Image (cartoon, helix red, strand yellow):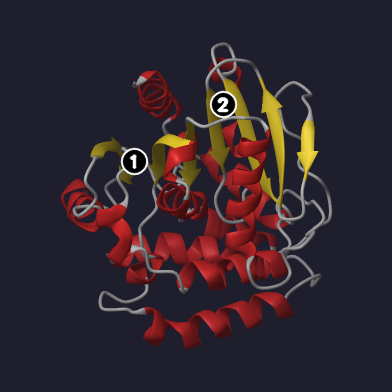
Amino acid sequence: MKDLALRIAAAALAPLVMFHPETVQCATAPAPVTQLAHISIQSVGKGPTIVLIPGLSSPRAVWDGVVPELAKTHRVLIVQINGFGGEDPGANLKPGLIAGVISELDGYLVANTITDAKIVGHSLGGLIALMFARDHATHVSRVLIVDSLPYVGLIFAPNATVATLEPTAKAIAAQMTASYGKPADLAAQTANAQRLALKPESVTKVAEWGAKADTRVVAQALYEDMTIDLRPDMAKITTPITLIYPWSTLFPKARADELYRGQFATAPHVTFVDVGDSAHFVMLDQPVAFAAALTAFAQAK
C-alpha cells in the first residue's frame, strides 16, 4: 500500500515543481476537435464509439500508442481536460470540474445520438468513467478503468474518509495553486515521474506532460478526486467494468491483487486484468499488453 501511495501521490504532487506554457503536440493525425468549457474532444475514425479519458495532468497524447489502430474500426473520441497539455484552463479553475467534464461528455454523446459508447479512463479519468456509468448508464455500454480506485483517499491512509482527508486535500490544492508559474525544477519533476512509470522513455513523457499541466487545474481536479468516494455506489453500477491494474517488484502482484480486487469487489460485473512489470502508466510501460487488453475490451459485446 505504501508503494502505491507514493506512486499516486507523486502524480498529484508532480505539477508542484514545474510549469511551462508550451503545448504538447498529439502524434495522431490531425482530426476535428470540439472545444467545450471543461474539455475538448477530438474525433478520429468511424464505427462504434470508444471514448478515451486521460488522467491527472495528462494530455490526450497519452493515448497516441493505441489511437491509430482503434480508429481503423471505431470512432475514437479523445478527451482532454482543459488546462492539461498546455491548453487554456477554460472553466476548470473553479469547483465543479469533474461534474462539468461528465456533463459535457454526456451532452456531446447525446448531440451525436451515441447511446452505447465504451469509455476508457486512466487514473482521474477512471473515476470520471465510473461516475459516468453511475449517472448515465443508458449512454454507455462498458467501461475500462486503468489503475484507478473508487476512492483515491485510500492510498493516503487505509482508513481514510472524505471528512478526514478533506483538510489534507485542501492544503495540497492550495500549495499547488500557489506554485503556478514558478521556476521549474527539472530534477524533481523527473524524480516524481520515476514513481509513475518504469521505462526511461515512459518517465520522460510523464515528466514532460506534468510540466505542461496548469497547476491551478491540477489542484482543483485533485481536490475533487480526493473528496469523492464512490465505494457506496459500486454495487449500483451495473455497466460491465474491465479493470487494468499494474504490479512490479516495487508493488508485488499479491498486494496489487488484494488492493484492486478488494476495492471493486462489490461491483456486479468486473473483469480484472493485471499487467506485470508496470507502474501507473500501464499504456507506456507495457504497450503490447495494454493494447491487447484494450482490443479485447473494444471487441466485447
Expressed as whole percent of the image width and height from the top left, the position of residue 106 reads: 59, 45
Q: Badge 1 is on which residue? A: 239
Quadrant where the image shows the C terminus: top left
Instruction: Identify the residue at horizontal 51%, vertical 50% (top origin).
Output: 125
Between discs 1 and 2, the one toward the N terminus: 2
125 over 117 or under it: above or below = below
Q: Badge 2 is on which residue? A: 65
Q: In the shown orientation, is residue 247 left or right of residue 38?
A: left
Instruction: Identify the residue at horizontal 58%, vertical 11% (top origin).
Output: 72
Instruction: Identify the residue at horizontal 21%, vertical 50% (top origin).
Output: 261
Closest to the observer: 209 or 36? Answer: 36
Which quadrant of the figure has residue 157?
bottom left
Badge 2 amino acid: Gly
Helix, strand or loop at label 1? It is loop
Q: Give the numbered dot on residue 167.
A: none
Numbered disc in front, either 1 or 2:
1
Expressed as whole percent of the image width and height from the top left, the position of residue 102 reads: 58, 52
Closest to the observer: 135 or 68? Answer: 135
